[in-house]
Every structure is written in structure tokens, then in C-alpha cells.
Image (cartoon, rainbow, N blue to C red):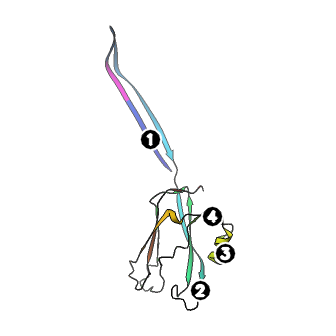
């Protein structure tokens, strides 16, 4: 919740002459204060969804895929807002990565059922045709501060909103 007071004040002193009449003003003034109230809230919750085993003879995602859901609530995601995800800070972790195609989707709306009732991403998408795909509303930046070795392996992802997105909740 935001609140700001705006105050406008002026005073007049001196003589005002109209024709042959003189009007004297001595600190005659006015002051008006208004209060502008606003409301902005944003909540973010990350939770594990499900694990998909690796495909036989896989050349990527050889350890399988772990799907996460990041649930954003509030009034809006403002332009420029960044949502970051980072692989564990555990220095011994060497087999869990983000890839450039790790973001399966960014959707706005309420799923038809609890997210845990869907056993695959395809079942989720097929059951929720009414959700709005907001993937193009975010820039994706991948970084590798953990210095993982290999091709297309990252330790951090930053999503940056390219526009303000009203959440209506």
C-alpha cells in the first residue's frame, strides 16, 4: 500500500489596482492538501511439481527433468520486475542444470485443477486451454556463476517483465 500527500499553497500580498480603485492584500492565501493512495502487491511461491525420467538414449536431460511451478499472486507484475531462479548453492552439486529451454511456459490464469493433479506437462497444457501464454512478455537471461562445464548448462535464470501485467487477484 502506498500513500503520498500532495500540498499546493500560495499567498498574495500587495496592492491590486483596477481603474481608480486599489485593493490591498496582506497574506491572503489558500492551501489544499490531497492524499493519493495506491495499492500494489506481489507474492511469489516456488514449489516442486513432478519429475520426468530421462528418455532412453537421451543426449540432453540425461538425468531427467524436474518441473517446478512458480506461482505469482498480487495486483500486477510491473515492467522491469525480475524473477530469479538459481540452482542450489551447494558447491558439490554437479549434475543439476538449467538449460536454455528450461522454461516450459509462462501462463496467466487459474488452472482447472490443483497443479499436483497433472502427471505431465502435456496433460497440464491440454487441460488448461484457457490460460494465457505470457512467455513473450518476459526476457530470459541464463547465467553460469557456478561455472558448470558442458554445453547449454546454466546455474541461474532471470525472467524480466517487458510490460506491466495486471494479475487481477
**Residue 121 figure quarter:** bottom right
In the structure shown, which secondary structural element does the residue marked by tag 2 occupy? loop
Query: Main SS of the magenta segment?
Result: strand
Q: Nearer the viewer, residue 81 or 44?
A: 81
Q: Which residues are magenta?
A: 10-14
Q: Which residue is mark 2?
A: 53
Q: Answer with mark 3 or mark 2, whichever residue precedes in sequence.
A: 2
In the rendered image, residue 74, in percent from the top left (x then y), is placed at 56, 58
In the rendered image, residue 142, in percent from the top left (x then y), is placed at 43, 73
In the structure shown, which secondary structural element does the residue marked by tag 3 occupy? helix
Q: Is residue 121 above or below residue 163?
A: below
Q: Answer with mark 4 or mark 2, whichever residue precedes in sequence.
A: 2
Q: Which residue is mark 1?
A: 5
Q: Which residue is mark 3?
A: 123
In the structure shown, which secondary structural element does the residue marked by tag 1 occupy? strand
Q: Residue at x 34, y 23 (%)?
A: 12
Q: Which residue is mark 4?
A: 131
Q: Is residue 111 above or below residue 26?
A: below
Q: Measure the C-alpha gap from mark 3 to mark 1.
A: 51 Å
Q: Nearer the viewer, residue 160 or 49?
A: 160
Q: Are marks 3 and 2 in contact (CB under 8 Å)?
A: no
In the rendered image, residue 104, in percent from the top left (x then y), is placed at 55, 73
In the structure shown, which secondary structural element does the residue marked by tag 4 occupy? loop
Is disc 2 surrounded by few (<14), some (14 to 19) or many (20+) residues within 10 Å?
few
**Residue 158 figure quarter:** bottom left
Amino acid at each position: 500500500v502506498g500513500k503520498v500527500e500532495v500540498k499546493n499553497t500560495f499567498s498574495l500580498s500587495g496592492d491590486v489596482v483596477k481603474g481608480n480603485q486599489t485593493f490591498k492584500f496582506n497574506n491572503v492565501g489558500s492551501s489544499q492538501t490531497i492524499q493519493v493512495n495506491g495499492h500494489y502487491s506481489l507474492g511469489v511461491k516456488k514449489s516442486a511439481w513432478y519429475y520426468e525420467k530421462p528418455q532412453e538414449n537421451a543426449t540432453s536431460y540425461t538425468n531427467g527433468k524436474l518441473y517446478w511451478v512458480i506461482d505469482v499472486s498480487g495486483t500486477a507484475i510491473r515492467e522491469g520486475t525480475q524473477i530469479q531462479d538459481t540452482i542450489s548453492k551447494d558447491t558439490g552439486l554437479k549434475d543439476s542444470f538449467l538449460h536454455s529451454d528450461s522454461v516450459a511456459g509462462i501462463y496467466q490464469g487459474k488452472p482447472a485443477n490443483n497443479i499436483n493433479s497433472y502427471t505431465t506437462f502435456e496433460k497440464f497444457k491440454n487441460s488448461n486451454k484457457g490460460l494465457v501464454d505470457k512467455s513473450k512478455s518476459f526476457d530470459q537471461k541464463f547465467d553460469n556463476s557456478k561455472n558448470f562445464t558442458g554445453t547449454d548448462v546454466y546455474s541461474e535464470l532471470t525472467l524480466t517483465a517487458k510490460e506491466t501485467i495486471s494479475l487481477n487477484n
